[in-house]
Image (cartoon, helix red, strand yellow):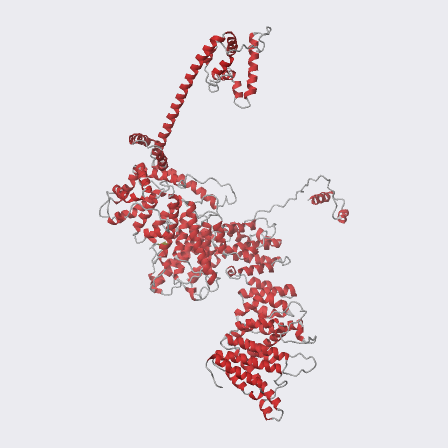
Amino acid sequence: MEREPGAAGVRRALGRRLEAVLASRSEANAVFDILAVLQSEDQEEIQEAVRTCSRLFGALLERGELFVGQLPSEEMVMTGSRGAARKYKVWMRHRYHSCGNRLGELLGHPSFQVKELALGALMKFVQLEGAHPLEKPKWEGNYLFPRELFKLVVGGLLSPEEDQSLLLSQFREYLDYDDTRYHTMQAAVQAVARVTGQHPEVPPAFWNNTFTLLSAVSLPRQEPTVSSFYVKRTELRDTWKVAHLKEHRKAFQTMWLSFLKHKLPLSLYKKVLLITHDTILPQLAQPSLMIDFLTRACDLGGALSLLALNGLFILIHKHNLEYPDFYRKLYGLLDPSVFHVKYRARFFHLADLFLSSSHLPAYLVAAFAKRLARLALTAPPEALLMVLPFICNLLRRHPACRVLVAGAWGSCPLTALLPQALQRHYHPEVSKAASVINQALSVPEVSIAPLLELTAYEIFERDLKKKGSEPVPLEFIPAQGLLGRPGELCAQHFTLS
Amino acid sequence: RTQTLLKEYKERDKSNVFRDKRFGEYNSSMSPEEKMMKRFALEQQRHHEKKSIYNLNEDEELTHYGQSLADIEKHNDIVDSDSDAEDRGALSAELTAAHFGGGGGLLHKKTQQEGEEQGQAKSRKELIEELIAKSKQEKRERQAQREDALELTEKLDQDWKEIQTLLSHKTPKAENRDKKEKPKPDAYDMMVRELGFEMKAQPSNRMKTEAELAKEEQERLKKLEAERLRRMLGKDEDENVKKPKHTSADDLNDGFMLDKDDRRLLSYKDGKMNVEEDGQEEQSKEASDPESNEEEGDSSGREDTEESDSPESHSDLESNIESEEENEKPAEEQQQAPGRGLTSGKERAGKAARDELPYMFAAPESYEELRSLLLGRSMEEQLLVVERIQKCNHPSLAEGNKAKLEKLFGFLLEYVGDLATDDPPDLRVIDKLVVHLYNLCQMFPGSASDAVRFVLRDAMHEMEEVIETKGRATLPGLDVLVYLKITRLLFPTSDFWHPVVTPALVCLSQLLTKCPILSLQDVVKGLFVCCLFLEYVALSQRFIPELINFLLGILYIATPNKASQGSTLVHPFRALGKNSELLVVSDREDVATWQQSSLSLRWASGLRAPTSTEANHIRLSCLAVGLALLKRCVLMYGSLPSFHAIMGPLRALLTDHLADCSHPQELQELCQSTLTEMESQKQLCRPLTCEKSKPVPLKLFTPRLVMNSQPQVIHPPWPSNYRCEPQHPAKKVIFVKVVML
């Protein structure tokens, strides 16, 4: 193939080849020239080649110039004595096949433009192949979908080597169609099985890609009245699985479970758990199957446990799951760091939810109240302002627990003592909040929702804004120096020199 | 004239019929005595009706009738309804006597008057004219007298004002300004008065004895302490009614009072030097002390500085006028400066550096201005400059000075922050500037507190930004620590709520909870914050959870990991990892050579590559401070009901420390004593533990009675239930109440 310099030259050359191949079967060998450019090092040339291939095979698919049916091997056909037309079709089908494989490889190309083009070309082939199937229908109304080609696409997307999140976000648009979504779910299960089978240590990139793809899948809430198919169909048959939401749900469930049964990186656990309660659980056919994953996550500790507990709570609450260890695990999460972690607001929001039932046994609530009170001794003011009303709410909900405060058991219980210490807290608001516990708790519960996200900075700002009307009180002992008078702490332990 | 002459004229050609309508005049059956009584009664009645509407006092006077001449005069006046209004009440008895040709009692006069009017119409005219002339003359005299009196009082007032300035040294400035508008009194007068007043002023201002002063001071402090206690308990938190501020103590609140205070102290100066404990005195002392030190053994140094002060105090008026003029004409400033220099001209000629400092400073309008004034000068000069700025711009000197000095506080604060962030930080200057900050703060509490709040907000804002972007903060520079310390010095930190201190407390809490301890420098900073925090609550004895956490962390990082396993650690410390053994000293030799010493605040701004021995010594010092603070906490919180729950983890770690015998002797002892202290608290807090919460009063359901015009029909809600137990009348009553509710 004569080369003209530059991308424009390549384009012209490829254009000529394309015309030639489409014009006459005798020029078919020019396809090799086009496919050769697909292997090029130059990014621009590849892009031109991808475009050309897309047009070439698109046209051939529409014309029906590709062999339909189980593809025989090339040598067999060539040596055979069947008609030239069949030979040509088989040969061309083999070229189409190799082109598809190469495009699949190009999904992992370093350049995003190439990837994008390759994906576009492949999806075009999927659409055309669906409309003009390359396999013979086994019976009347048989549902045909280019599964092999589509597997290639999904396999390329779920690359174990590199992050495909950008390409996956391009792929999202295809997930709006019922058929592509359905087949994506199936292909993903196969891809996960294949990769985990091949690699003893699955690279995290694969998990991330898979998660990105999986989380992008979202089922319609109700059975759609009109199915939207990516592959144009002339008729819609009831026997097709792809037309039923139930089947979609099954596929969805298989997909997630096959993904979650593996040992995922910790960061992924978090991502999965974050969408569990509102994205995954409601769309599963049998939500309680998630329990394995959730219990495993529950044992990981910290924020993950909390999130897992949230999932478990939904299962218990809505799906009648029995999980006796639930409150034990929640209790286990209460350690001093709970006031300092980033997910503090979420934790107490959920804890409030978990403990909201008034049917919980009093001993259990008492245990929580006591534990929280004890932990409050190490909490910063912003957490105290939240946790003190929290404890008060617990006592309000469960009047039986008030003995903890009232001291009816003879000796004064710890829970009563701790708020007493906090009544002497340096911050006036905390001190006030702590003294509420001593007052009548008959008043209705205080919503802690606005207190959950309270930060120290907000308290600071609030204190700054609050201005006393009287003149600012001043220190009456005159200052003598930076460190203060000799007897004071700073002067005792620090020097200026 | 219209009332006298015109009347005469009108009546001239008229032959009136005079009808005597006097009560009982022609009734012969009545005795004159009776007549008189009746008439008088009528008179009284009429007069009462007419006047009482306007004059409430009249009643009282009626009861006093006949008792005094003044009363009679008044009645007289009322009777003469045709007499001049101006002359009311001034018509003397003598005059009336002349008019009516004498006569005994009041009522006699009256009858006679009428009789005369009837009989001698001609001679009356003359008489009246005479009378008029007389009364006019009298009027004139009175007027003159009044004018005289007015003039005199005015004069007296003026004099008093001047005396006042000298007597009590009250804002002569304001007075001066007023005087400007008036015609200037001539020099001689002024001098005479001044001399006179000066002499008079002395004795009135008796110097208080030392004992009296001490007592006053003590009382002032007592009062302030009571005030502080009240605020600490947050008593007036919810009360909107504020008690008047303790003005007597804070008489520095406004420039006026301060000025008075200031002057008084200056006048005392000659007599007593060291009794004063007032802020102003402190300031001048503080300021002058380094000067005298600077003058290397120059014995007259101290005197000099005083002398440079004293002329001001002696010739108040003069110097004030001077400076006022200067304010008006800045061009003359240069000329005036040497003039002022004269007053301090007795200083040694050798001190060139000091002499070069201008004596007048305009208040800086921007921070850069102040910075350029202070930068590059020695500490003493900087302090002098600041002092002079304050003196030249005293609020009593000119209208806008208050605002200028208020700004100066903000600039000084900024300057202090800059000094603290310098490398190395100029802590000595800050140490001295703090005194100025205190004084300015006393003068302008409002703006000073705003300025402090502003720098705190800045610091917190910066930290919050770092936390948002990185997820965690680093301990801020020395400037923030210095600001927090200054807050402690300027404001009472024991208040239940305080507009500056409460935010500062939150700020301290943030420093202890949000900033991971990554280096030895962080440890020093952290310990300083702890010290500050404890100082903040030293009086109020309030509980600081963060501080306990932090000290626990300090103890933890001073213990080898394997020894301290099992203790729970709280943010910002981590149980394992790079910095979990930050304070562990393994070098035996360094342990042996360590001497207990205070931590240097300089280390907080950066440790310049200390040798390993130095670093180890610092580590041990840090631990020593940490332990000392812990001991302090133990003593302070011993009375807390949940003391042992709070101190539990600390106790475990302390025991570990004791078990590990690698610490120097002092530290071992400190550990031991802290531990003993902790354990001895146990017995103390036992009886406290059985504190019961106050019983909650049962809610009383009083029926709410709704006043309805229609009679309320009571429908029994549970008929079955009701019918079941008709034998309980009590039930019925309760039920009725419920329905009414």
Q: Where does residue A316 sit, x and y in percent of width and height?
A: 63, 64
**Which residue is nearer to you in this view: A191 or B295?**
A191
Q: Is B376 placed left or right of B28 in the picture?
A: left
Task: Say whether residue B511 is visible.
Answer: no
How many numbered callouts?
A: 0
Q: Where does residue B664 sit, x and y in percent of width and height?
A: 37, 60
Q: Where does residue A446 sit, x and y in percent of width and height?
A: 58, 53
The quarter of the displayed image where residue B43 is located: top right
**Which residue is nearer to you in this view: A34 or B721?**
A34
**Residue that lies at the very extreme toward the top in this rendered image:** B28
**Which residue is nearer to you in this view: A432 or B315?**
B315
The quarter of the displayed image where residue A357 is located: bottom right
Q: Is A297 placed left or right of B503 in the picture?
A: right
As displayed, is residue B95 above or below residue A353? above
**Which residue is nearer to you in this view: A162 or A236?**
A236
Q: Where does residue A72 sit, x and y in percent of width and height?
A: 61, 88
As displayed, is residue B418 above or below residue A128? above
As displayed, is residue A248 above or below residue B733? below
As displayed, is residue A135 above or below residue A382? below
